[in-house]
Image (cartoon, rainbow, N blue to C red):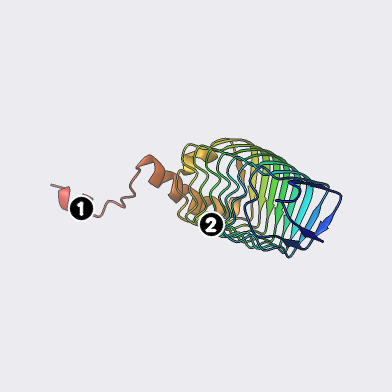
Amino acid sequence: MSFDPDVAPELADAVVTDVADGDLDDVELVRCVLEGVRLTARSARRLRLVDVVLRDCELSGADLTEARLTRVRLEGCRAEGLDLGMVKAADLVVVGSKLTEASARMSELERWRLDDCDLRRSEWQRAVLTTGLVDGCDLDHADLSGARLSDVRVMRTRLDDLVGARALAGATVDSGQLVPLALAVFADLGIRLDDGAGAEGDEG
C-alpha cells in the first residue's frame, strides 16, 4: 500500500511499498513492514516505530533526529549519512545495511545488534550503548568520542583508525582486532611508538 502521512500520521498492521512526498515528522508506525521504500533526505524527526521491519529501503540523508524505535529491524537498507542523533532505541537489529557517515550522536541504544554493516566514518559521539553486538561490520574511521558502552561485544569487525577508541573500555573484542584496536587506543591516548632508532647515537 501507499502511505500518505498528511492523510493519517499513524498507521498499523500494514505492508508499505510507497510513501507520499512530504515530511514524516511525528509519524507513528506500529506492526508494519516497509519494503523498497525511498526516503532519501526526508525529514522524519521524532518518528515512532514499534514492531516495524524496513527491508531494502533507501534512507540516505534522512533525518530521524529524536526518533523512538522499539523492536525495529533494518534489512539490506542503504542509509548513507542517515541522521540518528538523540534517537532512543530498544531491541534494534540492523543487518546487511550501508550506514557510511551515519550519525548516532547522543543516541541511546539498549539491546541492539549490528550484523554485516558498513559503518565507515559513522559518528557515535556521546552515545550510550547498552547490551549490544557488532558482528562482521566495518567501523573504519568511526568516531566513538565520549560514547559510553556497557555489555557490548565487537566480533569480526574492522576497527582501523577508530576515533575515540578509549570508549571501548569494558567491551569484549575478538583477538583478530588486537593490533588495529591497540593502535587506535594509542592514538587516542597520545601514545607514540618509538623503536629507539636514536638510542645508539646517544651512547657514549
Q: Which residue is mark 1?
A: 200
Label placed on residue 81: 2
At horizontal 73% and vertical 55% (from top left) the residue drawn is: 4
Q: Residues within 10 Å of mark 2 (few under 14, many from 20)?
A: many
- Left or right, 62 with respect to 53, comes to left
At horizontal 58% and vertical 46% (from top left) the residue drawn is: 84
- Left or right, 86 with respect to 116, comes to left
Q: Residues within 10 Å of mark 1 (few under 14, many from 20)?
A: few
CA distance for labels 2 and 1: 50 Å
Q: Secondary structure at mark 2?
A: loop
Q: Secondary structure at mark 1?
A: helix
- Left or right, 55 with respect to 59, comes to right
List x then y, in percent, for residue 150. 62, 34
List x then y, in percent, for residue 21. 65, 60
Seen as rendered, the residue at the extreme left is 204
Q: Quadrant of the N terminus?
A: bottom right
